[in-house]
Image (spheres, rainbow, N blue to C red):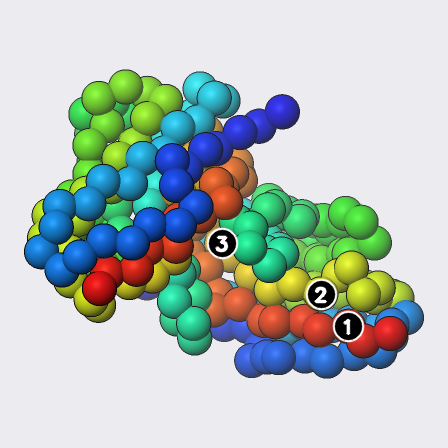
Amino acid sequence: DVKVTQSSRYLVKRTGEKVFLECVQDMDHENMFWYRQDPGLGLRLIYFSYDVKMKEKGDIPEGYSVSREKKERFSLILESASTNQTSMYLCASSFIREGQPQHFGDGTRLSIL
Amino acid sequence: GNSVTQMEGPVTLSEEAFLTINCTYTATGYPSLFWYVQYPGEGLQLLLKATKADDKGSNKGFEATYRKETTSFHLEKGSVQVSDSAVYFCALNRAGGYQKVTFGTGTKLQVIP
């Protein structure tokens, strides 16, 4: 069965810390995505990657970076966490062919104090 | 650019009522269209999809038809159950490129017994 696994369901960090969110997929998908989900704003794309070591900015990349050293793993990094980055973070992956759906992890609820 | 507009929620229905959640889109070319569902505490799951005009996607009693002339992809179900209570997202996957997805803001459905 298709599986996207995010390393933590809940995470609490302090302002200024460097935060790592990890995501692993077992479907050999080319694409991987990081979104944040906030009430009333839906899903907003932070970054995506279409291949190892390749990355593209999404709609709200400021304050974030990503790393994809292996095909199955995509990491989101908050360089210096701030309270406005408190949110639900969702990882997704998909094949690169047209019409292919995205598969999502269960999300990480991150609180920055 | 691409955009998806779906009806504001929350939508509250009694069990066995008919459901319609409206979705319209703006896109260049011929995008693929999706409905995703998010149950409490979980990530998004694909509910159904349609990849070309006049296609009908269906799953678990839900249906949606790709209407290019009205740029719409409305979600319908003839008889909702309490277990259908969730947030529903309409999305499009633009033709070509790296399969980035544009999501609507989501519609929360609550079904009461």
**Residue type at mark 1?**
Val
Q: Amino acid at mark 3?
A: Leu
In the drawing, does residue A5 fall left or right of residue B20? left
**In terms of depth relative to the viewer, which is nearer, B88 or A95?**
B88
The residues bearing labels 2 and 3 have C-alpha atoms spaced at a distance of 23 Å
Give the mark toward the camera: 1 or 3.
1
Residue A66: percent from left, percent from top: 20, 38
Q: From the image, which quarter does the N terminus of chain B lie in?
A: bottom left
Q: Chain of mark 2?
A: B
Q: Residue at x 62, y 79 (%)?
A: B10
| Both labels 1 and 3 in a single chain | yes
> Sequence order check: which comes first, mark 1 or mark 3?
3
Of callouts 1 and 2, which one flags the residue occurring earlier in the amino acid sequence? Answer: 2
Task: Give residue A36's position: percent from left, percent from top.
Answer: 35, 56
- In the picture of the structure, the residue carrying the numbered disc 2 is B85
Disc 3: CA contacts within 10 A as few (<14), some (14-19) or many (>=20) = many
**In the image, what residue occupies the spot 39% across and 54% down?**
A109
Residue B111, disc: 1
- Mark toward the start of the polypeptide (2 vs 3): 2
Kindly identify which residue carries mark 3.
B92
| Quarter of the view holding residue A81 | bottom left
Q: Looking at numbered disc 2 in the image, what kind of residue is underneath it?
A: Ser
For the residue labelled by badge 3, is the local secondary structure a helix, a strand or a loop? Answer: strand
Residue B28 visible in the displayed image? no
Would you say the residues marked 1 and 3 are in contact, meaning their CB atoms lie under 8 Å apart? no
The quarter of the picture where the C terminus of chain B appears is bottom right
Spatial separation of the CA atoms under disc 1 and disc 3 = 26 Å
Asked if labels 2 and 1 touch by Cβ distance under 8 angstroms, the answer is yes
Which residue is painted at 62% across and 56% down in the image? Answer: B39
